[in-house]
């Protein structure tokens, strides 16, 4: 059981690292080019999906740090209420980060390919460094999502191991 808690702690630290690295890549990336004698600066604020992804990443990283602190100071609990709460929040965090990353990837694909119907130019021909950094941020975020799915399965195991396999929603000690 101690190894499982250690594994959960290491996973949470890795998730925080990837989410904060992604947030730094998104938040600190900007590029300025001169187009027709006008200085054009592009940053994440021009793409609403990237801005939403930045805020989602910071909130989920903070949540994982809080969970890491709670797990560090708490001794093993025999009740299921905190474990249900942790399980549901881990699931929600994984789904929200996945949705935000997918929206940012779709929006970034529009930036790469452009759209004649929407009169949206292809940014990546002019702002290559910006596009490469956004692409790497999206890849790192998908790695964080994969780690969060693994963390959710560990959280589910921690929750459902308390219940009896013979009686529906009864604790093992009460069967």
Image (cartoon, grey):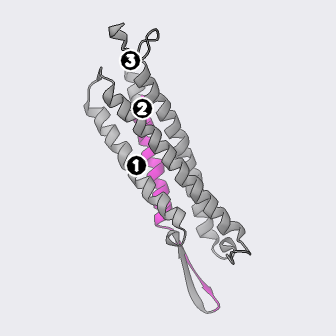
169 in magenta: no
Tell us which disc is closer to us: 3 or 2: 3
Q: Which of 156 and 26 is in front in this view?
A: 156
Expressed as whole percent of the image width and height from the top left, the position of residue 160 reads 43, 21
Q: Mark 3 points at which residue?
A: 162
20 in magenta: yes
> How much space separates mark 1 and mark 3, taking CA atoms?
28 Å
Name the residue rendered at 74%, 75% in the picture.
116
The C terminus - image quarter: top left
Name the residue rendered at 72%, 67% in the picture.
113
Tell me which label, 2 or 1, sits earlier in the chain: 2
Name the residue rendered at 42%, 18% in the picture.
161
Residue 77 in which image quadrant: top left
Q: What stretch is highlighted in magenta?
A: 7-36
Tell me which label, 3 or 2, sits earlier in the chain: 2
Q: Mark 2 points at which residue?
A: 8
Counting other residues with Cα less than 10 Å from the Cα at mark 3, is it few (<14), some (14-19), or many (20 or more)? some
Above/below status of 23 relative to 48: above
Counting other residues with Cα less than 10 Å from the Cα at mark 1, is it few (<14), some (14-19), or many (20 or more)? many
Q: Is mark 3 on a helix, strand or loop?
A: loop
The N terminus - image quarter: top left
Whether tag 3 and tag 2 are in contact, CB under 8 A, the answer is: no
Q: Name the residue under label 1.
A: 61
Name the residue rendered at 25%, 32% in the picture.
73
Above/below status of 52 relative to 162: below
Q: What element carries label 2?
A: helix
């Amino acid at each position: 059981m101690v190894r499982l808690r250690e594994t959960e702690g290491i996973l949470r630290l890795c998730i925080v690292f990837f989410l904060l690295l992604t947030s730094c890549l998104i938040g600190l990336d900007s590029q300025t080019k001169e187009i027709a004698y006008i200085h054009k600066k592009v940053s994440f604020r021009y793409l609403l999906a990237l801005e939403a992804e930045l805020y989602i990443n910071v909130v989920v990283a903070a949540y994982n740090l809080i969970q890491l602190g709670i797990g560090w100071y708490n001794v093993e609990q025999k009740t299921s209420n905190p474990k249900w709460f942790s399980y549901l929040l881990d699931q929600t965090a994984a789904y929200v980060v996945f949705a935000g990353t997918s929206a940012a990837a779709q929006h970034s694909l529009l930036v790469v390919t452009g759209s004649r119907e929407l009169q949206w130019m292809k940014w990546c021909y002019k702002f290559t460094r910006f596009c490469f950094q956004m692409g790497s941020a999206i890849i790192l975020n998908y790695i964080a999502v994969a780690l969060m799915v693994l963390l959710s399965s560990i959280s589910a195991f921690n929750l459902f191991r308390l219940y009896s396999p013979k009686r529906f929603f009864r604790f093992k000690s009460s069967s």
